[in-house]
Image (spheres, rainbow, N blue to C red):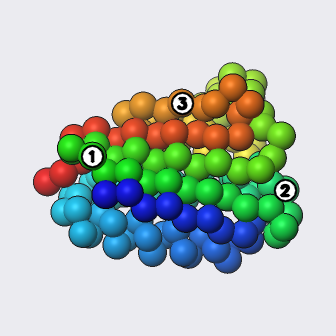
Amino acid sequence: MVRKFRIESKISNLGIIENAIDAITREAGINKENYGKILVSVMEAVNNAIIHGNKADETKFVEIAIILKNSSLEVTVEDQGKGFKPSEVPDPTEPENIERVNGRGVFLMSKLADEIEFNKKGNSVKMIFKHILS
């Protein structure tokens, strides 16, 4: 199964992707625990793409590709921004960062997905969730 989405950089479009994740995971028979990991990770990635990547510029788009193969789900989220260096995102678990509001998305995605990979430019993230079928 392959599903692709292209949304304008509006926070209100997060609902489109949430509904898609709901439908895809239900159709594939993905259990609740894995559904939660997938939903949180994908919503964080899309939110980051809209806000940080595209700077909420509604003339820019976020592209999401969801591929279910064997018992793994691969989700790629790409924005039209200039990118960033994931290694430069402060660790939100460090004492000096505990109070910070930003910086938790990349941390969450890396903890919830089995694999996470950013492209060289830093405007695309691929998350892989393995053995997700019930």
Is the Cβ of the residue at disc 1 closer than 8 Å to that at disc 2?
A: no
Question: Which residue is label 1 attached to?
Answer: 69
Q: Position of residue 94 (x, y in %)?
A: 65, 26
Q: For the point 34% across and 72% down, which residue is it?
A: 23
Confirm whether residue 123 shows in the render: yes
Q: Position of residue 104 (x, y in %)?
A: 63, 43
Q: In 3D space, how far apart are the residues under numbered discs 3 and 2 (Cα atoms)?
A: 22 Å
Amino acid bearing label 1: Lys
Question: Which residue is label 2 attached to?
Answer: 55
Q: For the point 52% across and 46% down, which residue is it?
A: 76
Q: In 3D space, how far apart are the residues under numbered discs 1 and 2 (Cα atoms)?
A: 33 Å
Which image quarter holds the N terminus? bottom left
Label 3 vs 1, first from the N-terminus: 1
Label 1 vs 2, first from the N-terminus: 2
**Quarter of image, res 118:** top right
Q: In 3D space, how far apart are the residues under numbered discs 3 and 1 (Cα atoms)?
A: 18 Å
Question: Which residue is label 3 attached to?
Answer: 117
Q: Would you call the spot at circle 2 few (<14 residues within 10 Å), some (14-19), or many (20 or more)?
A: some
Q: Position of residue 60 (x, y in %)?
A: 80, 61
Q: Would you call the spot at circle 3 few (<14 residues within 10 Å), some (14-19), or many (20 or more)?
A: some
Q: Single out the residue that lies furthest toward the top.
A: 87
**Quarter of image, res 8:** bottom right
Helix or strand or loop: what does disc 1 sit on? strand
Helix or strand or loop: what does disc 2 sit on? loop
Task: Say if 111 sits above or below 37 in the image.
Answer: above
Q: Position of residue 105 (x, y in %)?
A: 61, 45
